[in-house]
Amino acid sequence: MLTEEAFTYQKCNICPRGCGVDRHSSAGFCKAGTFPVLARAALHYWEEPCISGSRGSGALFFSGCNLRCVYCQNAEISRKPAGREVSSGRLCELFYELKEKGANNINLVTADIWLPTVAEAISRAKEEGFELPFILNTSAYITVESLKKLEGLIDIYLPDLKYLRSEDAGRYSLAADYPEAAGHAIDEMVRQQPDCHFRDTKEGPMMTRGVLLRHLLLPGKLIAAKQIVKYLHERYGDHIYISLLDQYTPPEGLSGFPELLKRPTGREYKSLTDYAAALGITKAYVQSPEAAVSDYIPAFDGSGL
């Protein structure tokens, strides 16, 4: 099911940084090699209801990242290759093991820099008749060319849209081109999955195809968040679901960014959700304040590997 053009780690241009290195022998910005590093493979219960349900999402947490978000909630694994290297064959086996545990889907969490191996594993599973939906849980900092190689493999795209201002993207994630790159990437995701589809279950409606886009409200960034919501509604309308996250928690050791050393206020988040409703957005998820606790971050202890 892969496209004819090779999808490899040679002259790596998976993401917009375009390092162009051969990852078999050199390292680019993300410092990644050619074997994906996994920190956890287990049922995960804290995604949106249409993803986790009550049985859980089969989450595979990948280490490494091509962004450097100063507020990263998973810095333990995003800043270094923490975990265990796996082959595409072992990755495919993990899909089946999570299915046996009752997973509603296979949730590839921050797999962005490992897409060639991920695509190979998914292609093999689908050719064998594997039926659970595959989710790419992503920062959206991926090239359109890379996403096109995933067409027919990814059933649900679960991207972030972190910023529309290049100043914020450069300051907080060392990627001033993020707004433009992510915009193009999300356009491609919606092209591949133009509408959301669900199946009715005892757990409620579970998503089987589509795009569910997330935005995390940062402290002091209410106006920027409203601009993002407006942009998404005007560009995609009811073709996507939007998830407005209120789970930001200042990470330990954060310095040099005093504006991020607090949580968004309840009033800010309510203003954002009220604004979304006033725009006429109905296909959306919101969070309660209880979501901003460390309990929602799993232990990256190699479980399930």
Image (spheres, rainbow, N blue to C red):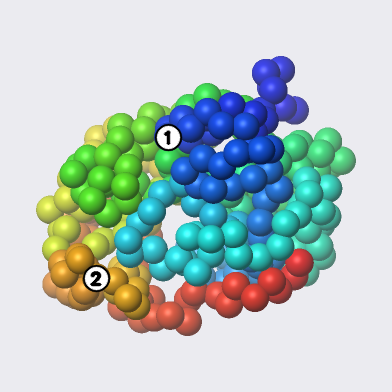
> What residue is drawn where x is 30% and y is 35%?
177
Residue type for callout 1: Arg
Task: Residue 2: name its quadrant.
Answer: top right
Residue 300 x, y percent position in the rendering: 60, 72
Q: What mark, if any, has residue 17 been given in the picture?
A: 1
Residue type for callout 2: Ser
> What residue is drawn where x is 27% and y is 46%?
169
Residue 260 appears in view: yes
Give neighbour class at mark 2: few <14, some 14-19, many 20+ (Cα, 10 Å). Answer: few
Give neighbour class at mark 1: few <14, some 14-19, many 20+ (Cα, 10 Å). Answer: many
Near-viewer residue (259 or 184): 259
Q: Secondary structure at mark 1?
A: loop
- Left/right of residue 140 with respect to residue 272 in the rendered view: right
Near-viewer residue (257 or 263): 257
Q: Most extreme residue toward the top, as rendered?
A: 4
Query: Pointer 2: what residue?
Result: 255
Residue 198 appears in view: no
Q: What mark, if any, has residue 184 been given in the picture?
A: none
Q: Secondary structure at mark 2?
A: loop
